[in-house]
Amino acid sequence: MVFGPDDPERVLAGMEGQLIYSEDGGQNWEIVLQPENYSYFLDMKASLQNHNTVYAVGTDGGTGRGNIIVYISEDFGLNWRDVTYSGQEGKDYAARDLGLLTQSGQEAMYVATNDGVFLFSP
């Protein structure tokens, strides 16, 4: 879950196959992302530099193995784009965790998988 930077009533939550959003602290929810490729969202973080930017990570095909997909929203979950990492040909990955770090003024994203940790540059 990620809470709004200026309003804790705004909440984003990752679910099995979808991301949901609430403006009233969780009383009511709406689906803001339901990818066609069915991603199980395993972690989500707000940017350290811009709290309206949110990153979510998953693996296509659910919790099994496939391509790693990083979903990015720059308006706290209202709109999303994705970046797919397919890695080595013929090898499947399972995303497990997401970490953010600021290095030399740039944000770096680390994604832990079943086959090591990968660095993404948002």
Image: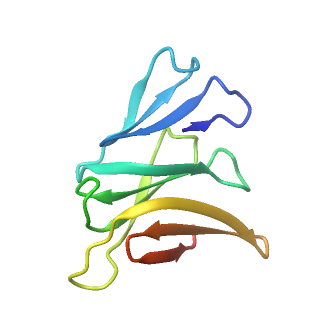
Relative to 15, say whether 47 is above or below: below
In this image, 95 relative to 63: left or right?
Answer: right
The spot of residue 41 in percent (x, y) is 39, 49
Relative depth, front residue between 100 and 53: 100
**Badge count:** 0
Q: In the current view of this chain or complex, which residue is farthest to the top?
A: 27
Relative depth, front residue between 37 and 16: 16
Residue at (30% x, 43% y) in the render: 17
Q: In the current view of this chain or complex, which residue is farthest to the bottom?
A: 88
Q: In the current view of this chain or complex, which residue is farthest to the right?
A: 104
The image quadrant where one finds the C terminus is: bottom right
Relative to 101, say whether 18 is above or below: above
In this image, 1 relative to 106: left or right?
Answer: left
In this image, 109 relative to 101: left or right?
Answer: left
The spot of residue 50 in percent (x, y) is 70, 51
The spot of residue 92 in percent (x, y) is 26, 73
Q: Is residue 73 visible?
A: no
Q: Is residue 43 visible?
A: yes
The spot of residue 94 in percent (x, y) is 34, 65
Residue at (65% x, 34% y) in the render: 4
In this image, 109 relative to 31: left or right?
Answer: right
Q: How is the image coloured?
A: rainbow
The image quadrant where one finds the N terminus is: top right
Relative to 20, say whether 54 is above or below: below
Residue at (60% x, 27% y) in the render: 10
Residue at (32% x, 41% y) in the render: 16
Relative depth, front residue between 15 and 29: 15
